[in-house]
Amino acid sequence: MTPPPRDRQRAFLRGHVAEHLAAFYLIAKGYRIMAMRYKTRSGEIDIVARKKDMAIFIEVKARASVEDGLNAVTADAQERIRRASDIWLSRQRHAGHLGVRYDVVIIRPWRWPTHFISYF
């Protein structure tokens, strides 16, 4: 069953807010944001960041608990992110010199973001 349009709009807005909070958090940790909401036919990457010689592809989840957030990063989602990251990397001139990492940032109400490095 499809949720009512108003619920979808709220979820969409909550996702945008969570992605921006995660981006600010990552910037404070020394990451450089290269792209947000990078879309391809294969999938979408919430945040593409760089730190030193590493390209980091970050999935952001806004959930009530860390466990719920991690459970939401399914194997299918991971595969879509990997395919989209391959496309992003193919469009970068110096991608051959970059390491690649996949992180997850969980945004919970009234809590600091939780960052899982090299989650998948």
Image: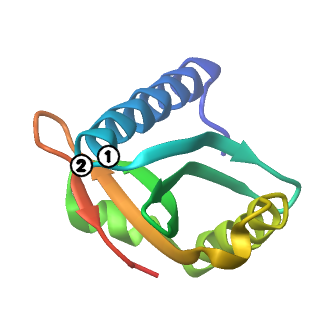
Q: Nearer the viewer, residue 41 or 23?
A: 23
What residue sits 29% from the left and 48% below the top?
30
- Which of the 4 image quadrants contains residue 105? bottom left
What residue sits 41% from the left and 67% below the top?
103
Please state if 111 lies on the left or on the right of 5 as rendered.
left
Please state if 99 lies on the left or on the right of 42 as rendered.
left
Residue that sits furthest to the top in the current view: 6
Give percent across and percent down for residue 116.
29, 69
Question: What residue sits right under mark 2 in the picture?
Answer: 29
- Which of the 4 image quadrants contains residue 115? bottom left
Dot 2 falls on a residue whose secondary structure is loop
Please state if 18 lies on the left or on the right of 112 as rendered.
right
Q: Can see residue 79?
A: no
Q: Nearer the viewer, residue 32 or 7?
A: 32
Q: Nearer the viewer, residue 24 or 15?
A: 24
**In the figure, 28 relative to 17: above or below?**
below
**In the figure, 55 relative to 9: above or below?**
below
Please state if 68 lies on the left or on the right of 54 as rendered.
left
What residue sits 23% from the left and 40% below the top?
28
Question: What residue sits right under mark 1 in the picture?
Answer: 26
Circles 1, 2 touching at the beta carbon (< 8 Å): yes
Residue type of the residue flagged with mark 2: Lys
**Count of marks, rendered view:** 2
Dot 1 falls on a residue whose secondary structure is helix
What residue sits 82% from the left and 64% below the top?
87
Give percent across and percent down for residue 98.
59, 74
Q: Can see residue 39?
A: yes
Residue type of the residue flagged with mark 1: Leu
Give percent across and percent down for residue 14.
42, 29
Q: Quadrant of the N terminus?
A: top right
Q: Residues within 10 Å of mark 1 (few under 14, many from 20)?
A: many
Kindly identify which numbered label has been placed on residue 72. none
